[in-house]
Amino acid sequence: MRKTVYSLPELEWCDLTRYNDQQPAIVLTTPHAKIAAEYFLKQINLKEIIYVQSSQKVDVNQITAKYVKAQVVYAIGGGRVIDIGRYLASRWGLKIICIPTIISSDAFLVDCTGIRENGCVTYVPSKKADRILLDWELLKKVPLKYHLSGCGDVLSIYTGVYDWKYVNKLGIASSDESYSQSVAITAKGILDSLLSETEEIKKGTKKGLEILITCLGMEVTLCNFFGNSRPEEGGEHFFTYCIENKIPRFLHGEMVCFGVLITSFLQKQPWRPLKKFMDTVGINYKPDGLTLEIILETLEEISDYVKIHNLRFSVYNNFLFKDYENKTKSFLKEIFKI
Ligand SMILES: [Zn+2]
């Protein structure tokens, strides 16, 4: 069978105040990110600004249908803007240069896009960034906790590998998710390398952020070699997709971090060492709007949800909420300190 291993996009650390580009450009951003990068807009040949506020299929299709006259797309913002920006550029047949203002997920490093429809996420092929421009002066304007949420897509290896091993143990793994010890060990090595840098990450230095970006890059590369995101995506992401229907807006990485805690608890894995890491570096794993009621409601629905949406097998497929209700309530009391 034909197999292609894709590489990471080009990543450049640079000083964006010295940047100049005269190609006609479309900028995709959010009102908030635009303020942070206002000066940058004067240095390019700006034709149009489009605000990306949603990754719902209907909204994305509406932007896709727009007639755009440009040679290059700049996606300036967090995960959603960059994810959708790569999709739009691929549909418009344009180059895309990504300027992350928040490192809250691995979206700037991948070549597919998560589109939301009927209450779930589908990953569709888009394109990888032609260039990623990272400017420390721009990134450091944002409160550290937003960048730290990007740890979620590395910490998810903890629960992702468990679910991957679990489906193989049950003997019901699909052909593209056969367990590979070497890939699993490498994935855990990436997770351990993040945890080993707790002190540096906590300081909020450029070096700390580079460590996080390196871990995200290694995680994406490993998934590229493996062929899909099975080593990195499991129940913690499915929990996040399910709860998205109940909470209008949150940072992907923050909810994935909560997902890692609750999923590892339900997998009967030690979860306190991960909570300790999150507490020490300052990750917010209790996103705004996350309440006990919503969590319990999500857990009640999740085993149906993962089946309806045909998500990969995880601890949630055979999950019976009633059996875990009391234990989960004690776990949540500890997390929410109540
Ligand atoms: Zn993710």
Image (tube, rainbow, N blue to C red):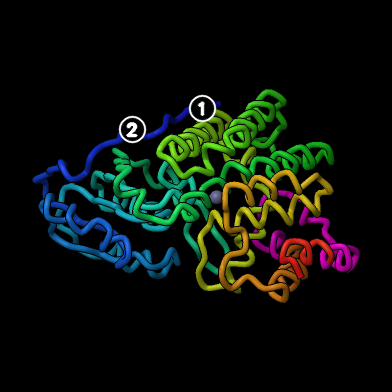
Secondary structure under the numbered disc 1 in the rendered image: loop
- Residue type pointed to by label 1: Lys
Q: Which mark is residue 113?
A: none
Cβ–Cβ below 8 Å for labels 2 and 1?
no
Please tell me in which quadrant of the rendered image residue 290 appears.
bottom right
Q: CA distance from mark 2 to mark 1?
A: 22 Å
Asked whether residue 173 is in view, the answer is: yes
Query: Which of the two discs, 2 and 1, labels the residue nearer the N terminus?
Result: 1
User: Hey, which residue is sitting farthest right in the picture?
Assistant: 323
Secondary structure under the numbered disc 2 in the rendered image: loop
Q: What residue is at 72 percent from the left and 60 percent from the top?
A: 307
Quarter of the image with the C terminus is bottom right
User: Hey, which residue is sitting farthest bottom in the picture?
Assistant: 293
* Along the viewing direction, whichever of 102 and 4 lies nearer the viewer: 102
* Along the viewing direction, whichever of 112 and 50 lies nearer the viewer: 50
Q: Which residue is mark 2?
A: 10
User: For the magenta stretch, what is the residue range?
Assistant: 305-329
Asked whether residue 310 is in view, the answer is: no
Please tell me in which quadrant of the rendered image residue 209 appears.
top left
Residue 43 is situated, as x and y percent measured from the top left of the image, at 12, 50
Q: What residue is at 28 percent from the left and 64 percent from the top?
A: 65
Q: Please tell me whether residue 74 is drawn above or below residue 177 in the rendered image.
A: below
Residue 137 is situated, as x and y percent measured from the top left of the image, at 29, 46
Q: Is mark 2 within 8 Å of ligand 1?
A: no
